[in-house]
Image (cartoon, helix red, strand yellow):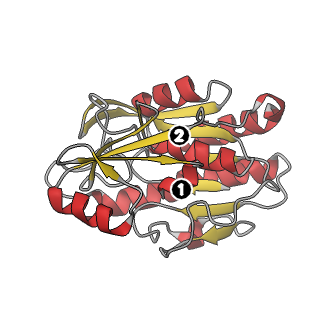
Amino acid sequence: MVAVDCEGTACGAGHPDMPLSQSKQADFIRLQATKEANAAVISLFDNGAENVIVWDNHGLGVNLEYELLDERCDILLGSSAKPRFFLLDNSFTGVLLIGYHAKSNTIDSAMAHTYSGGTFHCMKINGSEVGEIALDAALCGERGVPVIFVSSDDKGIHEAKILLPWIETAITKHSYGQNFVLSKHPTKSTQEIYTNTAAAVKNLNRMKIFEFTKPLHYEVQFKRINQVEKALMEDRLFSRVDGYTLIKNVKKISDIF
């Protein structure tokens, strides 16, 4: 499964005053995310993959230029109440995270946030802040599937390598601010994703399942009081620590979703 976000693509800088979907870069980033995902897909098939699912997981899940993807892949898209990483089970060999980004509070990282920049200040597991790379890797681990490859900016890759030192990676750009980057050329980025995906497949024997140490203590800090109150109404397991912070203990990582 190739899980595709958008903020971590080459030449993606976003805009300081509006969501990515409304910025002048939106069309370019959607196309570049498609090209970077497709480079991974082609490399997987070239190196023996039998089936590949591309999961469009940014925002509402309708971002990529689907007709440009290799016709051998299947495409998971849209938004619903289905669990995150729908269809993923231990019959899958691995997961690739394409176009991912660093967690909230990462200094000088382009468009860094955790799931919703307008909703969450940060999330923590067992007292340590985590982002989408860690949480998604743990969700894959819960299904018995390793993350084998991540592409992101330099800050996201640094975060990923601490958590998942066995993976192959591709740095698409170096970030110097929330909306300021020195990027690789888009074509060079796709070429590196192709090459390093092949390396990931060749090194499958060193890939590992990622899991957080149990028991799991989840903490989430919201940005607005009304978001806290809504979460309390929807989930009675939460306890309130202060005006913006909720905590709960969970048996498995998917319980936080």
Read off the residue under disc 2. 216
Q: Quadrant of residue 50?
A: bottom right
Q: Which residue is painted at 42% across and 53% down in the image?
A: 6
Three-letter code for the amino acid on which mark 1 is drawn:
Asp
The spot of residue 102 in percent (x, y) is 40, 37
- Residue 200 higher or lower than 74, as above or below: above
Q: Is residue 256 visible?
A: yes
Location of the N terminus by quadrant is: bottom right
Outermost residue toward the left in this view: 17
Read off the residue under disc 1. 255
Query: Left or right of 30: which side holds 197?
Result: right
Query: Left or right of 5: which side holds 190?
Result: right
The spot of residue 189 in percent (x, y) is 52, 39
Q: Which residue is painted at 55% across and 61% down in the image?
A: 84
Q: Which residue is painted at 37% across and 58% down in the image?
A: 28
The spot of residue 29 in percent (x, y) is 39, 56
